[in-house]
Amino acid sequence: MNKLALTSAMSAALPVIDRLEQAGFETVFVGGAVRDALLGRKVQDVDIATAATPDQVMALFSRCIPTGLAHGTVTVMHDGVPYEVTTYRRESEYVDYRKPSAVTFVTDLDGDLLRRDFTVNAMALRGDGSIHDPYGGLADLRNGILRCVGDANERFREDALRMVRAVRFIGTYGFRPALSAWRSLRHRRELLRHVAMERVHAELDKMIESGNPARSLAWLDKSGLLRHTKEPLSFVVALQRRSKAKYELGFLTSISDPDARWAALAIAADVSSADTRDTLEALRMSNKRSQRIMSAVALFEGMAEWLPKGGSVIPDAMEVIDEAFMRLLLRYGVTAATDWLHVERLMANAEAAIEGSAAERLVFMDRFEKLIADAPLLVLKELDVSGAELAEALGKPAGPWLKHCLDRLLLESALGRIDNKRDVLVRQAAAWEEERAE
Ligand code: ATP
Ligand code: MG
């Protein structure tokens, strides 16, 4: 008999299980937590399944929230931690290749495990550490194989998102797909057009945030799935080009922020900012996240025309390039600039490892990083003169000239070419205005 030591997150949940068991309802750990505990991976949230109906669960615990009663889920609070307790169920009719809206509660555990997507996700762990594994999940886990529970063709037809989940598990866990699963996936991939973009987005996020995004992306590419989403994802074409390119996307793991990783992906695959925007919109990415990603990509795009692709730069051009960088930095912000520089550096190193040298590009990265570090100021409000003060000093009514003038003063002082001191700034502005008047 296989016995597993419970992880600390599971031990903490044990009183919830015991309570239900003592009331006569079989109750177990299920899903990702069981899989991850068996792999010795960190277990985040534990899912609990029970033979008790939601009403019976709620009668046993004073603190609970009826989270998803229609689906049989009650959130039980224990020691300040929320646990999702879901009644054993079978999913009745699948309509339109999506998750069913109605479910049927059942009392047998095997029935509940049967509706789950993959064998490695269809095991249960009892409170005493014994494993219940009716569909061979343990053997598949040991052999690193991702296999559907039951007929793969049928399971992907029922819920087409499972194909994307398959790629995620294959990629993030380093599994190989069972032949049946892979064949069916390639056969059924067009059904992905029935799946809400939000659900695809959630899976892509998990892939990109994982410990090996490059592997998931390579499998995504092989699956051809992303060409069949409900709304087109423009970056797919670029990614495919990338996967045939010189260096791999392994460097993504050196970037910890998820949004910076998305940006890095777009930059590495050379996706235009227009295509990136379309892709993020199609995925329903939040404004806040899109903004961070888009700023880095826009800055990258803006710099692309200045940086040498092959040949070296004429020394005189250096200052012009510094200025171009500073303009973009002031426009898109320090986060965008550091996100971009980080990617460029990682790519240059990856390239250097393969081709011997990327010295030229690294010289630029050093210069730009120094520009950021040395900049006495980077935002208008730190300028030692306000718009109103400048207009008064020059004796001119505010107008478009003023904004233009302030931006130019900011650029010059950020580059350290003039002092950020009121009299210096006013004198400089007066000189420019005089020049313009001539
Ligand atoms: P993660 O580590 O990403 O949370 P997980 O396996 O826990 O992985 P969840 O989306 O949290 O994934 O789902 C919990 C469990 O519910 C899965 O392990 C699986 O048994 C089942 N499940 C989730 N989505 C589906 C689906 N689309 N079809 C069938 N079963 C599913
Ligand atoms: Mg989970």
Image: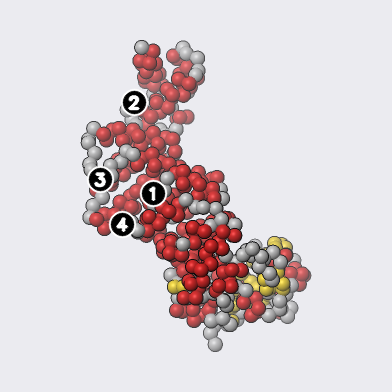
Image quadrant of residue 27?
Answer: bottom right
Three-letter code for the amino acid on which mark 4 is drawn: Lys
SS under mark 3: loop
Within-10-Å neighbours for mark 1: few <14, some 14–19, many 20+:
some
Q: Name the residue under label 1.
A: 270
Q: Residue at x 52, y 64 (%)?
A: 189
Three-letter code for the amino acid on which mark 3 is drawn: Gly
Q: Distance between the Cα atoms at labels 2 and 4?
A: 43 Å
The dot on residue 418 is: 2
Of the image marks 3 and 1, the number of the one nearer the N terminus: 1
Query: Label 4 near label 3: C-beta < 8 Å?
Result: no
Label 2 vs label 4, nearer the camera: 4
Q: Distance between the Cα atoms at labels 3 and 1?
A: 16 Å
Q: In this view, does 206 lie to the left or right of 359?
A: right
Q: Name the residue under label 4.
A: 246
The dot on residue 310 is: 3
Three-letter code for the amino acid on which mark 1 is drawn: Asp
Label 2 vs label 1, nearer the camera: 1
